[in-house]
Image (cartoon, helix red, strand yellow):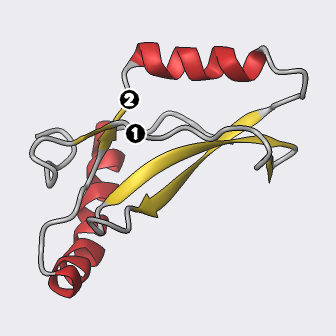
Amino acid sequence: MGKHITPSEATSLCDNFDLKQKALTSLIKKEDNRSCLFSLSELKDYIEYLENLPNTIDGVRFYLGSYSDTSLTTLFLCPTLNGVDNASIDAYNFGVQGNPSNKKYGK
C-alpha cells in the first residue's frame, strides 16, 4: 500500500535514479525525461472515468514506457482490480514533460 514519503526520501529516490539516468543518457545519446506532469484536474477526470465504469476498479498502476519515435521515457496509468491490470479499459498517458525534461525533484 502506498504511503506519504518525506521530501528527503523523495530526494533520495531521485538521486538513486541518477545512476540509471547516466547510463541511459549515454546509450540514447540525449537527455531523457525525468518526470511527467498530470494536472490535478486531469487525474480527477481519469479517476471519475474509472469510477463510472461498470467494472470494479480498486487501484491504478503507474508504468514507465518509452515513445518509439523519440526514445523518451513516459509515464502511463493502468486501472487494476485485485492488483491485476485491467487492460480492457483505457490506460492514461500524455502528461506534460518536465521542463526542462531533466529537472530533478524539488529543483
Question: Please, what is the three-letter code of the amino acid marked with disc 1?
Answer: Phe
Q: Which of marks 1 and 2 is in front?
A: 1
* Label 1 packing within 10 angstroms: few (<14), some (14-19), many (20+): few
Q: Which disc, if any, is residue 71?
A: none
Total number of numbered labels? 2
| Residue 47 or residue 5, whichever sits in front | 47
Residue 37 pos. (x, y %)? 32, 34
> Element at badge 1?
loop
Work out how far the residue at label 1 is from the one at label 2, CA to CA, in angstroms. 8 Å
Query: Residue 6 location, x and y as percent?
Result: 37, 37
Q: Mark 2 points at which residue?
A: 38
The answer to whether residue 38 is above or below residue 104 is above
Q: Which quarter of the picture shows residue 89?
A: top right
Residue at figure coordinates x 21%, y 80% from the top left = 28
Q: In which quarter of the image is residue 49?
A: top right
- Residue 74 falls left or right of residue 22: right
At x 54% / y 15%, what residue is drawn? 44
User: Going by the image, does 66 lie left or right of 11?
Assistant: right
**Amino acid at pointer 2:** Phe
Q: Are marks 1 and 2 in contact (CB under 8 Å)?
A: no
Q: Residue furthest front?
A: 69
Q: Quadrant of the N terminus?
A: top right
Say which residue label 1 marks: 94
Q: Position of residue 48 (x, y in %)?
A: 66, 14
